[in-house]
Every structure is written in structure tokens, then in C-alpha cells.
Image (cartoon, rainbow, N blue to C red):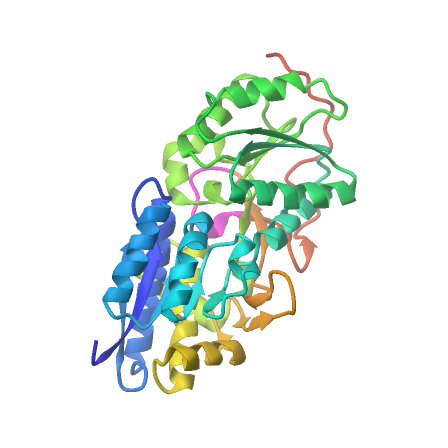
Amino acid sequence: MENTIGIGGLGPLSSPGISWAGHELRDGMALAVQHVNAAGGILGKSLALIFEDTCGHTNAGLAAVEKLINDGIDAFAGEYHSLVANVFLDRIQESGLPFVCASCTLDAITERRLSSVFRLAPPQSYGWQIYADFLGAEGFRHVVALQEENQYWTSGSKAIELRLQELGVRFTRLSAAPGSVDPRWWIRQVQSIASYDPCPDMLLLLLSDENAVQVTMDEARSCGFVPPYCFFGDPAGRTGFPEWWQTAPAVSTKVPFLSYMRWSGLTRIGRRMIREFEKQHARQPTFVALEGYDSVLALARAFEEAGGTDPESVCSALRRIPVEGTRGTINFSSEPNGVVHQQWKWPPVCVMAYDRAPRQFGEAELFWDSQLGLANAANRLRAPQRAFSSGG
């Protein structure tokens, strides 16, 4: 890589990972590389993106990191699956190469306070608490988590539970080991508590397997757990993306999801990125593509500031320089304790949902904004409803 500066991209491009997310990351990163090189590159060199498939699996993620190190890359960027990233971080730290984590939200990623790890996405405890604020503002009274038992879903569920307790909203967790139950089991459990006061009016889909999510939603519909009496929630955001619309359009509307961008708040860089992305891919990007784009911009700016690719110098530059990204000015902040360690504090966090299918990502309705609260008090996801009576 004598005449280039190599960025090793990481993300799931195949099963069992969420492949749309990996492609969004890769496409956003590739566009940023194009733009940097078209503007003259960095220090007389071109950026080069080498993107490896982590498959949403820890072993594949470790293998991808090892391959990129052997390829002689100068920095890492990307990844979508938090549990995968949390496993390969030690190898990246050992290599000394900087890693700009684009999309993973698990608190542990920054709580570990690794010197070479920087994060763009908000920590889960922050973003999911905002989701809970939205649920409280919308008037939900009994939130039920259908939760697979793993570190990611458990930590997210606890973040929502703690905030809802503060807001006086009832919370029930129904949990099972991954793959241990028929997906229809979840709704049978909901039926068993349907007579509670208040009755369940929001079911959080904290399940990894997309087929299980879809079967669970279909079963809920057949038993009458549907809007306006009972809603689904997907804080992890799968219901916001194109592949979901292709497989489950009938159950995709009015499912609020977290989005780490607001269309009205895009910078000039963000607006340009959107235009160019649409030209190349004939669709609007999701926020995941913008996270990928921003991760490359941050590294490019750090290489320039450092005057080269020396890892310690690049990490030092990332710690001190602001970077204008697609969604605002990125500063990697650190605090003495907790999750704010080389963390962008904070990217935009919004709650959005679609009112019909299929839609472009930019057509999702904004219901809650971390800075503004309710986006439009006259256009709520739900109105106060009479109690639900299960016909199951």
C-alpha cells in the first residue's frame, strides 16, 4: 500500500448477519473514499477501502480483523453487530490501529476504555432511554419486552425498564434462550397477561432471528394484538429498512424504531452525500450508510492532522480535532467514568415509524427527537384508547 492509505472496513454482508446493514456501511464508506480522493486524497496519497464480511458472527469477525491486519491496512472502521465488535476489539487494541466504530451501540464497547477505539453511534443506554421517553410521552401504559437472552437485548431491555419505572409505566419482561421456543410462544405469554390492568399496549421485539420476529408479529395480529390497541416496537431499527419491507410489509407500519439522523438537521456534507448516494444506488441511504461515511471522514481528517498513518498520532488527532460530518460536528469526548470514552456525544437520536409500506427511508415520520421531544403534537403515533380485550 505504498501509494495508498488503507482503511479496513468491517460489516455483515451475509447470513447470519443483517446483510443490509453491512451493505449500507460499505456503500457509505466507499462513497466517502470516492469524495476524499476526488478532492485530492490525503497527503498526496489515495484512500483505499478493503471491506471484509463479518457475517454477524464472532469467529468470522475475528478472522476479518486478522486478514485486514495481514493486508497492511492503516485503520479500521465500521461494524454493525455489537456482540461481534465486542469480541474483536481486543485484537484491534493489540494491533494498535485506530478503529472508528460506526454503528455498534453496546455500552461495553466504550466502557472498556480502549485507547484505539472511537465510536460514532450512541451507547445503547443513551439511545434506548430516549426510546423509553418516547413511549412515555405517547401514553403507553404497559410495555412488554419479548426478549431473547443475550448481552445486547438484556442491556437494552434494562435501559428501557429503568427509564419507564421513573416515568411510572409498567414494564414486563418475557424472556427465553435463543432458539429455545417456537416464535408463537411469545404471543401465548402475552395472552396470559392480557387481563392485567393496565393491559399490554406495546410489545418490544427484542429478538435476533428475523423469521422469529415476523412469525411473532403474524401471530400477534391473528390474536388481535394490533393498533390502535397494541403496538409493536423495534428499538434496534430493523423495521426501518428496505429488506424488511420486502419480507413483511403487512406488519411494518406504525412500528417505531430508533434512527441516528434527522433529515432536517443534515449538514451540507450530509445533503451532498444523500444526493450522490441516490444517484449511485437509486434509493435513499439509511442512517447506517451515513455512519459509514462519517467513519471514513473522521479517519481521513485524522490522517491529515497527524501528517501520516502512525497509529498513535492518528489516535491523538481523533481525540482532539472536530470533524464536520453528515449529521453534525463530530467530537470524540471522554469522561472519567462510564460510556463516554472517545465517544461522539451525541449524534442525533430520533424515533420514527412508517404510516404505510413501502416507503423510502426519508419518508418515515418523525415522532420523537432527543433534542426537541415530541416532533409534532398534532400527529401522534396513537391516541388514548379503550382497554384491549383478547379474543385469543
Residue at image coords 56%, 21%: 187
- Image quarter in which the N terminus is found: bottom left
Magenta stretch containing residue 357, yes or no? Answer: yes
Question: Does any portion of residue 32 appear in the rendered image?
Answer: yes
How many numbered circles does the render carry? Answer: 0
Residue 206, above or below 324: above
For residue 313, which quarter of the picture?
Answer: bottom left
Residue 3, above or below 204: below
Q: Residue furthest top?
A: 391
Magenta stretch containing residue 208, yes or no? Answer: no
Question: Does any portion of residue 278 appear in the rendered image?
Answer: no
Residue at image coords 57%, 40%: 154
Q: Residue furthest front?
A: 94
Residue at image coords 55%, 64%: 265
Write the start and end of the magenta stretch as one range.
356-364
Q: Position of residue 69 (x, y in %)?
A: 28, 65
Residue at image coords 45%, 69%: 116
Left or right side of 282 for 125: right
